[in-house]
Image (cartoon, helix red, strand yellow):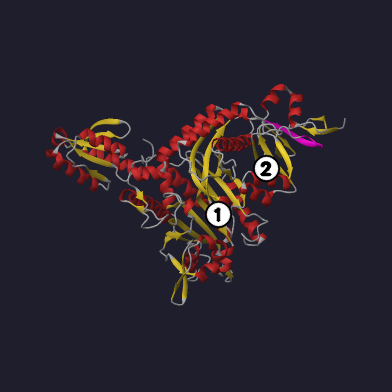
């Protein structure tokens, strides 16, 4: 019999019979490996364990200990979900069902809407099918045959997918033996060997989704779920999910009256309520103070400009679809700005600069507008109008590394003061093959990327490189923050830009008396006020540290006769520049305490006869309870110290 040589991950090799499967290879290595095998890999391509080995290749046997297999498990669970849905609701037609970062989803077309009550029924059917330990078999069909089959079953979306993506031979996967399956799907695979491997899954929610993601197509119903190899991993995930729901800034923001969204204003345009506006103002004052210490010059610039400005900068060409439509004003076309950099460039070029003037650091809390699609809008974290802690540094080439280092130090100090500890660095580079998305200038890109690498290396900071994530005009360093679920998003960014100074013909007079082109560094340290506030709400679950809390203390008179002293206490604390409220309602003090604890006020100051007589306050902490009686002056100094030192721990 003909044999082929396979190379194993440890570098060893062995001869196997041509046409034997990955599972056969696993059995030859050991029965435990064969039993644990989830999928295989042939020359780096993931395949089901039943795939024949037809040529000499590098082969891996992957178990649930390998990172690649969780995605396979979730993909197989998506198929199990769809199979269960069609057994329970035969009129349902299939869309797509991929794995995701946290689980899976499957899209369905059904005349009747799914309800939350349907999810337990579908889950139960999934468990029933899983316990039958049915194989997931790969089947190849001539394209015409599979189209005929899907058409006969009324699966018009599957027919469309096969027409779009299928070749002369179409790959499908079954649940159940290939000769007599209970379910079939057009799919790239691979999948787990059998449904019995699916033991830890949970359906989570129902949502709407457009076919192929286009609003022009029909709306489908999407069922979300998750899956893990072990019940313990599933339980841990569900606990984190519950924690994330409890901390969700939309929920907390409503409960604590931080912001609201009103249809009369429009989607993605939140209204900041007094408490939320206070947090925002604290953030704005904080970062402006830090920037002033470092020599930034703060400016104001308009929220709109002529379309020609953005054509000149390149934003119109590269970001047109993400901008609001232009407005015709008399003989001019104006547009809401998506970026602040063109305005800051014009401020720089409003006067001549010498090499001695540089670096010029122009900063602004600049409001910008992005035409985000309604489906992605979310509270404060994804909006259409946002205010960025923005700045642009115009410097000489020999100043880039120093300026970059100074920005990094500012980022790290700001994160420390805000209590942010979980973040990572991503060097975002261009996709060299994409000439439409990125400025076509190899020398500029290589130079900019090298400068950022050298700066990060000199700071001994770890980073990952991410091709395809750069701005259209240059590479950037993104600081990624992780949420409760471990999802990362960019909050701070530093971009080195040689392109826009060239586009605008920016200059400075060098030591040689000649004109030179400055380098431009774009940087946002604490993101937009909207996004950073949403992050901090979830980081602290609404229980902000004293320096960020919209109300730092509330004074609670025990009865009406103590109101006068309570007002005096409130006035003295406010005179000490502290944010203090007074609760004069005719309610029992214990009820007031409970309510303000729910509102996550750091300190509650109860005052009665004894406190009024002694000039003290009875202090309660939202977490640690009764802190005893303290002289008013002593407590005032204590609270001021927490505020001034920006203490983030309780």
- The reply to whether the magenta stretch includes residue 56 is yes
Q: Where is residue 376 in the image (x, y as percent from the top left)?
A: 48, 51
Nearest to the observer: residue 294 or residue 123: 123
Q: In which quarter of the image is residue 541?
A: top left
Whole-angstrom CA distance, mark 2 to mark 1, is 24 Å
Left or right: 42 as drawn, with respect to 413? right
Looking at the rendering, the stretch of residues picked out in magenta corresponds to: 52-62
User: Residue at image x 23%, y 34%?
Assistant: 591
Front of the two marks 2 and 1: 1
Mark 2 residue element: loop
The dot on residue 188 is 2
Nearest to the observer: residue 307 or residue 55: 55
Residue 113 in the image: above or below residue 9: below
- The reply to whether the magenta stretch includes residue 640 is no
Mark 1 residue element: loop
Q: How crowded is mark 1: few (under 14 residues within 10 Å), some or many (20 or more)?
A: few
Residue 276 in the image: above or below residue 130: below
Nearest to the observer: residue 482 or residue 496: 482
Q: Which residue lies furthest to the left in this view?
A: 561
- Earlier along the polypeptide chain: callout 2 or callout 1? 2
User: Label 1, on which residue?
Assistant: 217
Q: Position of residue 237 (x, y in %)?
A: 50, 33
User: Residue at image x 53%, y 37%?
Assistant: 225
Residue 216 in the image: above or below residue 74: below
Res 351 seen here: yes
Residue 66 in the image: above or below residue 221: above
Question: If the image is split into quadrants, where does the N terminus sit?
Answer: top right
Q: Quadrant of residue 146?
A: top right
Question: If the image is split into quadrants, where does the C terminus sit?
Answer: top left
């Amino acid at each position: 019999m003909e044999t082929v040589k396979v190379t194993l991950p440890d570098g060893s090799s062995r001869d196997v019979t041509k046409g034997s499967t990955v599972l056969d290879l696993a059995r030859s290595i050991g029965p435990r490996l064969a039993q644990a095998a989830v999928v295989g890999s042939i020359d780096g391509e993931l395949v089901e364990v039943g795939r024949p080995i037809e040529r000499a290749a590098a082969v891996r046997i992957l178990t649930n200990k390998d990172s690649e297999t969780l995605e396979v498990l979730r993909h197989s669970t998506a198929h199990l979900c769809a199979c269960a849905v069609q057994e329970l609701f035969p009129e349902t037609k299939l869309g797509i069902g991929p794995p995701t970062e946290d689980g899976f989803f499957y899209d369905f077309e059904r005349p009747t809407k799914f309800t939350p009550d349907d999810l337990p029924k579908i889950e139960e059917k999934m468990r029933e099918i899983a316990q039958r330990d049915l194989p997931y078999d790969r089947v190849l069909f001539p394209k015409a045959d599979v189209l005929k089959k899907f058409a006969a079953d009324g699966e018009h979306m599957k027919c469309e997918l096969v027409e779009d993506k299928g070749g002369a031979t179409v790959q499908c996967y079954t649940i159940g033996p290939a000769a007599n399956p209970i379910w079939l799907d057009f799919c790239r695979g691979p999948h787990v060997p059998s449904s019995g491997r699916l033991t830890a899954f949970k359906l989570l929610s129902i949502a709407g989704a457009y076919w192929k993601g286009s609003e022009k197509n029909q709306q489908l119903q999407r069922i979300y779920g998750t899956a893990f190899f072990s019940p313990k991993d599933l339980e841990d995930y569900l606990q984190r999910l519950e924690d994330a729901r409890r901390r969700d800034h939309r929920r907390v923001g409503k409960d604590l009256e931080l912001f609201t969204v009103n249809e009369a204003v429009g989607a993605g345009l939140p209204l900041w309520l007094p408490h939320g506006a206070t947090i925002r103002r604290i953030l704005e004052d904080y970062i402006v103070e830090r920037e002033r210490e470092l020599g930034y010059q703060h400016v104001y610039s308009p929220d709109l400009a002529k379309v020609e400005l953005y054509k000149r900068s390149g934003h119109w060409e590269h970001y047109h679809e993400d901008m609001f439509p232009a407005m015709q004003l008399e003989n001019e076309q104006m547009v809401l700005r998506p970026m602040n950099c063109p305005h800051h460039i014009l401020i720089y070029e409003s006067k001549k600069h010498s090499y001695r003037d540089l670096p010029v650091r122009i900063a602004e809390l600049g409001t910008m507008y992005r035409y985000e699609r309604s489906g992605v809008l979310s509270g404060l974290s994804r909006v259409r109008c946002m205010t960025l802690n923005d700045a642009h540094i115009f410097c000489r080439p020999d100043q880039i590394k120093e300026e970059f280092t100074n920005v990094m130090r500012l980022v790290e100090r700001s994160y420390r003061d805000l209590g942010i500890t979980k973040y990572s660095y991503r060097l975002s580079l261009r996709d060299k093959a994409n000439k439409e998305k990125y400025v076509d200038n190899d020398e500029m890109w290589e130079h900019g990327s090298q400068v950022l690498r050298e700066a990060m290396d000199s700071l001994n900071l770890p980073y990952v490189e991410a091709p395809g994530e750069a701005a259209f005009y240059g590479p950037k360093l993104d600081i990624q923050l992780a949420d409760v679920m471990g999802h990362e998003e960019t909050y701070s960014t530093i971009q080195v830009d040689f392109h826009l100074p060239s586009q605008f013909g920016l200059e400075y007079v060098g030591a040689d008396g000649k004109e030179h082109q400055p380098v431009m560094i774009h940087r946002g340290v604490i993101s937009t006020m909207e996004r950073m506030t949403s992050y901090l709400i979830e980081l602290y679950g609404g229980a902000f540290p004293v320096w960020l809390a919209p109300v730092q203390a509330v004074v609670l008179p025990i009865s009406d006769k103590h109101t006068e002293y309570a007002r005096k206490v409130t006035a003295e604390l406010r005179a000490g520049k502290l944010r203090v409220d007074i609760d004069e309602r005719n309610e029992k003090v214990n009820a007031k305490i409970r309510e303000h604890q729910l509102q996550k006020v750091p300190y509650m100051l109860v005052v009665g006869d004894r406190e009024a007589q002694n000039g003290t306050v009875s202090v309660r902490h939202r977490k640690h309870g009764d802190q005893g009686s303290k002289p008013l002056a002593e407590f005032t100094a204590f609270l001021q110290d927490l505020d001034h030192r920006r203490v983030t721990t309780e």
